[in-house]
Image: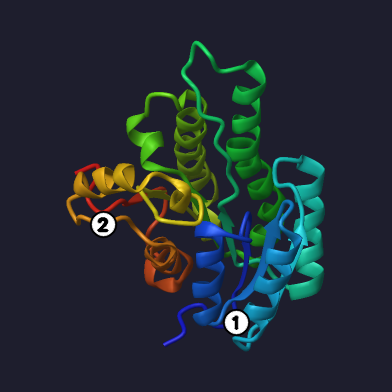
Amino acid sequence: MKLLQGKTAIITGASRGIGKGIAKVFAQHGANVAFTYSSSVDAANALEIELNGLGIKAKGYQSNAANFAEAQTLAEDVVKEFGSIDILVNNAGITKDNLLMRISEEDFDQVIEVNLKSVFNMTKAVQRTMLKQRKGSIINMSSVVGLKGNAGQTNYAASKAGIIGFSKSVALELGSRNIRSNVVAPGFIETEMTAKLDEETVKGWRAGIPLKRGGTPDDVANVCVFLASDLSAYVTGQTLNVDGGMLT
């Protein structure tokens, strides 16, 4: 059963990792996919070909969600190309980890801009279309770090906690128009980035998780399918932890 048949989704930061996983699972469920990337041109082209091979329409856009004007242009381009925007997944994000005493103002500002302001930019960009349609599902990618904090990640934790407050407010504002806004908070998800970490460190993290494994991009993507589809028609303003029980 294809849960997203005929729907159009915008997914930011989808050339690798969790974003790529979401794009692929959405396409498997019948969604047309417009995705953004910042610099990985070859990876984006390969993903576009792979997604189109699944029998849906897919297109990659080199666009910076942290730039207000670029976000507006992207939404306009997607409506022209695809005809609608039914789902927005705000996934683009970066880290610039350091202890508070060492973190620079620039590294704080950049993480807030890319992780949090991009959510404002993109939500504002799709709002008009979703209001016209009188339907839409907005899914914002936070993190367990946004819920519990983490030493050496004051900037990242602040940006991810901010996403939760923003999403709840959007749910209250747009609920009467049948536009839903929810948050997914992943825990330790094993991607290309975590593959570069020391194996012993990773083993230690896995041991501390009740399910005794790291998550996969598909684990996160499947929860996003639920929130994007009509299965969750009465769910808004919620944060779903996908963390193997880490915050239990």
Q: Nearer the viewer, mark 1 or mark 2?
A: 2
Quadrant in the rendering for residue 222: bottom left
User: Which SS class for mark 1?
Assistant: loop
Relative to the observer, which residue lies in front, 28 or 107?
Answer: 107
Q: Residues within 10 Å of mark 2 (few under 14, many from 20)?
A: some
Residue name at image x 46 percent, y 71 percent: 229
What type is the residue that disc 2 sits on? Answer: Arg
Residue 43 located left or right of residue 99: right
Tag 2 residue: 213
The x, y position of residue 130, in whole percent, is 64, 60
The x, y position of residue 227, in whole percent, is 43, 63
Q: Is residue 132 visible?
A: no
Going from N to C along the chain, the mark reached first, 1 or 2, is 1
Quadrant in the rendering for residue 236: bottom left
The x, y position of residue 47, in whole percent, is 65, 72
Q: Is residue 119 visible?
A: yes
Residue 32 located left or right of residue 188: right
Residue name at image x 41 percent, y 43 percent: 143
User: Which SS class for mark 2?
Assistant: loop
Location of residue 11 with respect to 203 vertically, above or below: below
What type is the residue that disc 1 sits on? Answer: Gly
Tag 1 residue: 6
Relative to the observer, which residue lies in front, 105 or 89?
Answer: 105
Q: Quadrant of the C terminus?
A: top left
Relative to the observer, which residue lies in front, 139 or 159?
Answer: 159
Location of residue 185 with respect to 132 vertically, above or below: above
The residues bearing labels 1 and 2 have C-alpha atoms spaced at a distance of 34 Å
The x, y position of residue 29, in whole percent, is 49, 80
Location of residue 138 with respect to 64 vertically, above or below: below
Residue name at image x 45 percent, y 80 percent: 3
Relative to the observer, which residue lies in front, 219 or 224?
Answer: 219
